[in-house]
């Protein structure tokens, strides 16, 4: 008889599409377990933990936060410094890269400046000058590339039960959100849902950022105050039976884009029927914008966020 206990790896997945003013944001969140064999007794994936039992029935709780105003591009001639139109931030307008860049040369006047694409970085580099700095120069002065729409690693590293957490269970550096049933979770300092904070401050790269809580519903519709800012989402999985906090993740969205302009109103033209018996014909159409066909495989040149039904419906 085999006396070894079965071990399970719990995984929590969370993804948020790019937010656009007036369009619903639907978090893609799910939690699942995988039975480990003798060769996989430790979980090497982020946002996962090893437990003796498979994940129980669970429900999710969400909290949305609005970030501060940010400068999207340091190049003064960039139109995206003041415009957050979906047209300006499309894959075509950004040159197809979808990556932002940051200057890491400590001897440059552009040190730590962020640019929306490679073209703006090249144009701004022509105006940069050398400065004296006491900061040690990195081995490589190649600008850091960041994928547009990605979340900050510092946020996501604090997820409950992930391999980056201080311990399995609740992160030692962060208090998880309150439970939906107002059950205190793991420690006297853990907040309840009735004591949700109105805002908190975090540090990224030595800069303090203020984040204000704006909603605790699953769906969120960005409005004018969110345009040009990033949103942060906390998703926590709780046991349905006990209300125990199982895992949670924190992700940050890309900048909220402004609402697309309304299409021009077109007047219908009614054609009067011609006298006599003219030729008759039949027209057949089909819905090329059906959600099932709006995929990046079908439209590889289109941004993923612009293919979502919520964006195209509005």
Image (spheres, rainbow, N blue to C red):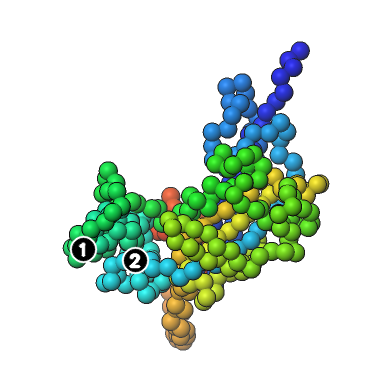
Mark 1: few, some, or many residues within 10 Å (few <14, many ≥20)? few
1 and 2 marks in contact (CB < 8 Å)? no
**Image x and y of residue 225, in percent:** 52, 75
- The residue carrying mark 1 is 128
Q: What element carries label 2?
A: loop
**Image x and y of residue 142, in percent:** 27, 49
199 shown above or below 5: below
Mark 2: few, some, or many residues within 10 Å (few <14, many ≥20)? many
Which residue is painted at 53% across and 47% down in the image? 157
Q: In this view, does 226 lie to the left or right of 142?
A: right
Q: Is residue 284 left or right of residue 300?
A: right
Quadrant for the N terminus in the image: top right
Residue 73: mark: 2
Which residue is painted at 43% across and 74% down in the image? 279
* Residue 147 vs residue 248, the one in the foreground: 248
* Residue 175 vs residue 72, the one in the foreground: 175
Q: Is residue 120 left or right of residue 183?
A: left
Which residue is painted at 67% across and 56% down in the image? 177
- The reply to whether residue 70 is in sight is yes
- Distance, label 1 to label 2, CA atoms, is 15 Å
Which residue is painted at 58% across and 68% down in the image? 212
Q: Which residue lies furthest to the front in this view?
A: 134
Residue 230: mark: none
* Residue 264 vs residue 151, the one in the foreground: 151
């Amino acid at each position: 008889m085999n006396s070894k206990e079965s071990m399970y790896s719990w995984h929590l997945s969370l993804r948020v599409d790019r937010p656009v003013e007036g369009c619903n944001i639907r978090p893609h969140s799910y939690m699942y377990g995988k039975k480990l064999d003798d060769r996989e007794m430790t979980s090497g994936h982020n946002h996962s933990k090893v437990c003796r039992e498979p994940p129980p029935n669970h429900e999710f709780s969400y909290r949305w936060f609005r970030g501060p105003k940010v400068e999207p591009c340091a190049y003064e001639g960039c139109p995206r410094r003041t415009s957050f139109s979906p047209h300006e931030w499309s894959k075509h307008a950004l040159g197809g890269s979808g990556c932002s860049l940051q200057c890491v040369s400590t001897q440059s006047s552009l040190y730590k400046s962020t640019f929306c694409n490679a073209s703006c970085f090249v144009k701004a580099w022509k105006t940069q000058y050398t400065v004296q700095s006491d900061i040690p120069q990195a081995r490589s002065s190649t600008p850091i590339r960041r994928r547009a729409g990605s979340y900050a690693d510092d946020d996501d590293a604090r997820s409950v039960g992930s391999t980056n957490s201080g311990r399995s269970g609740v992160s030692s550096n962060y208090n998880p959100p309150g439970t939906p049933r107002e059950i205190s979770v793991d420690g006297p300092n853990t907040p309840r849902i009735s004591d949700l904070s109105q805002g908190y401050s975090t540090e990224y790269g030595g800069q303090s950022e203020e984040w204000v809580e704006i909603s605790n519903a699953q769906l969120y519709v960005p409005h004018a105050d969110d345009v040009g800012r990033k949103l942060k989402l906390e998703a926590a999985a709780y046991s349905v039976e006990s209300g125990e906090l199982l895992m949670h993740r924190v992700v940050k969205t890309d900048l909220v884009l402004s609402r697309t302009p309304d299409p021009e109103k077109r007047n219908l033209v009614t054609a009067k029927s011609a006298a006599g018996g003219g030729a008759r014909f039949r027209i057949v159409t089909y819905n090329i914008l059906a959600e099932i066909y709006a995929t990046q495989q079908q439209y590889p040149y289109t941004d993923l966020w612009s293919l979502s039904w919520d964006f195209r419906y509005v």
